[in-house]
Amino acid sequence: MTADQLRKSILQQAIQGKLVPQDPNDEPASVLLERIREEKARLVEEKKIKKEKNPSVIFKGEDNSYYEKFTLSGEVKFIDEEIPFEIPNGWEWTRISNIFQINPKNICNDELEVAFIPMEKLSAGYGSNYSYEKVKWSKIKKGFTHFANGDIAFAKITPCFQNRKSAVFDKLPNGIGAGTTELKILRTFAETINRFYLLYFLKSPYFIEGAIFKGTANQQRIISGYLENKLFPLPPLKEQQRIVEKIEELTLHIEYYGKAQTELDTLNKNIKEQLKKSVLQYAIEGKLVPQDKAEGTAEELLLQIQAEKQKLYEENKLKKKDLEHSTIFKGEDNKYYEKIGKNIICIDEEISFEMPKNWRWVRFGQIVKLSMGKTPPRDDSRYWLNAKRNWVSISDMTNYGRIKTTKEQISEEAANSLMRECSPINTLLMSFKLTVGRTAILDIEAYHNEAIVSIYPYIDKKFMLRNYLFYTLPILANIGDSKDAIKGKTLNSKSLNNLLIPLSPLAEQQRIVESIDAIFRCIEKNSFSNIAVQ
């Protein structure tokens, strides 16, 4: 159970009368209700509040069912279906509108300095934290929601409502203030209800998760009447106090628990990531699976790739410059050299590890074709309106993931007039700017931006090479020649093509990928007992 789940559980138990024991000596909640009715009558007589339109009393009949009697009309209504849970003896069910003043108004001197609380100054969560600006009353008395010391506020708009933006106001300048119209304010009658019990009720799953909303997708508010008609479980006043004290006591323990949980989650995540990196390092060094002579050599695979490239050139599908290739070999001095045409240069400093004899170091551009992306001008609506063509950005990519949808689309005009080829399903993508080396495979046809490259192996039976690169490029790309960018590291076209790739036979690549898949599944399940790295 998470800390958040634990908090919700405690609040739910609190309002159901399960958090602290009942005391038969407590003054019952029915007395509180009578006291509230008397206080309301007095305030109505003094013309400080308006008379209720339709007050009611909820009671349990002789048949053990719940009924609601409307005091003005005398109507009695069966409400058993509305009762969400049973409450202890001594508690009472009532409507919010019957026991609280909702959205009261302040009257004071225009020059008085008071509190102003916009939504951003009201904290989310399970506490009662807020800040305010000091302003003159004249500036905020109209067009804002009024409140005073002792009032309880909560946000009525999403997602602030679900995030539990609510608080008990106290020590306001001159005792009053005003704030965003997206607040609902509750004011208690006399000393009948503990304000923090009410606050915890407003943060409980019963109140939050039962809400009904109305409005557009981005601006939904609780429907009119949700607050007013909500059934409120009212405990005796002394029990309210005990409930609040217990919640506050448990909150300290939950905070320690939550901190420990966060640290553990971070540790587990880091351990998993480090384990995966270790596995991938073993993979690219040829240590993850044993070599099999029957599978041939990387040299043979390179010859097949060169033959395929020659064929594509003869079919006018490849440029002559793309036929150029280098040969990387180990000299008699045990250093690595690269032969490009007639030139031979030492590249020993580029080689970061040793690998099996049947493997070969190759430049990335020799074994794959790369296709860059583009972003249509943002200020030209032609390219973004009526958009139906998938367009990938780095935010659509997760490490070792598959892309099934994109956050943005581009128009048909953008696709036809500006973009390069559309990448088909099963294409391997890699980010190479700012976020370097993030890989993903397309499950949809899509275009992509200029920070992403599509990767097409020249020879790839059953996607063996694609899948091998899918796992190994995140490490290999960050070994390469990355340049500092304003917001992070980046590669360019030249450095992409020059990435050093440890190439194994295709069949071994398949076994490597199968082994990585199996180990990664175990890591995610935290089950390492069956992992054996050879």
Image (cartoon, grey):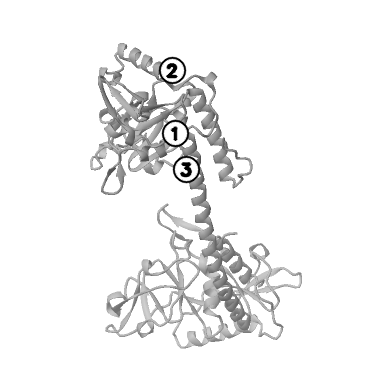
Q: What amino acid type is highlighted by mark number 1?
A: Phe
Alpha carbon of mark 3 to alpha carbon of mark 2: how far? Answer: 29 Å
Foreground: 69 or 5? 5
Q: Amino acid at mark 3?
A: Lys
- Image quarter of residue 103: bottom left
Residue 77 seen: yes
Which numbered disc flags the more N-terminal residue, 3 or 2?
3
The picture places residue 305, in percent across and down from the top left corner, at 39, 18
**Left or right side of 522 for 316:** left
Q: Where in the figure is residue 213, as x and y percent of width and height? A: 48, 58
Q: Amino acid at mark 2?
A: Glu
Of pointers 3 and 1, the one earlier in the residue sequence:
3
Left or right: residue 301 compared with residue 514: left
- Would you say the residues marked 2 and 1 are in contact, meaning their CB atoms lie under 8 Å apart? no
Cα–Cα span, label 3 and label 1: 13 Å
Residue closest to the eye, 302 or 232:
302
**Residue on which disc 1 sits:** 470
Per the image, the residue denoted by label 3 is 277
Residue 300 disc label: 2
Give the CA separation, mark 2 to mark 1: 22 Å
Q: Residue at x 40, y 83 (%)?
A: 171
Identify which residue, 130 or 305, lies in the foreground. Answer: 305
Rendered image quadrant of residue 93? bottom right
Element on which disc 1 rests? helix
